[in-house]
Image (spheres, grey):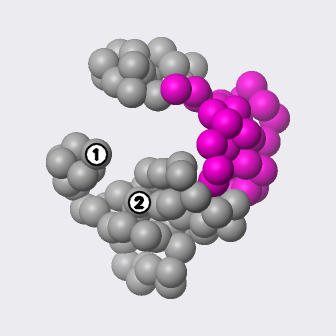
Amino acid sequence: NLKSVLDDFGILSYFQEVVESAVVGVRKPDPAIYALGVTKIGLPAQEVLVVGDSYSKDMVPAKAVGCQTLWLKGQTWGEDKLQDTGAADQQFTSIFDLIDFV
C-alpha cells in the first residue's frame, strides 16, 4: 500500500493525507481522485500542490480541479517528449529539484 511505500522512503510524515485509488475506487486520470484529496485535507484546491510524473494522468486532472501542479518530467510513461500545454505550473527533471523547491 502507498503509506507503506512512503514510510519505507522515510517521507510519510510529509503527507497530511494519502488517497489511494484502490481504497477509494477512483483511478487516475479521473479528476475525482484529486477532488477527494483536496476535500480530505480541507484546503481550497488552489492551495494544494500536486506533484506527479505523468502529464496526462497527474497534471491535467489536478489542474482541472484547480490545484497547483508540479510536473516531475523525466523519461517515464513515454511523455518525456510532451510539451507542457499549461497544466503544469512548474516543471522539474530531478527529484532533487523538488527537494530544493519545497
The residue that appears at 54% across and 49% down in the rendered structure is: 48
Who is closer to the viewer here, 68 or 11? 68
- Residue 10: in magenta span: no
Quarter of the figure that contains the C terminus? top left
The residue that appears at 42% across and 83% down in the rendered structure is: 83
Q: Which residue is mark 2?
A: 70
Alpha carbon separation for disc pair 2 and 1 = 11 Å
Structural crowding at the residue carrying mark 2, measured as other residues with C-alpha within 10 Å and reported as few (<14), some (14–19) or many (≥20): many
Query: Quarter of the image holding residue 23?
Result: top right
Q: Is residue 48 left or right of residue 72?
A: right
Image height of 58 relative to 80, above or below: above
The residue that appears at 34% across and 24% down in the rendered structure is: 11
What span is colored magenta in the figure? Answer: 16-45
What residue type is disc 1 on?
Val
Q: From where the camera sits, is residue 54 visible?
A: no
Dot 2 or dot 1: first in sequence order is 2
Query: Quarter of the image holding residue 38?
Result: top right
Q: Which residue is mark 1?
A: 102
Secondary structure state at the residue bearing disc 1 = loop
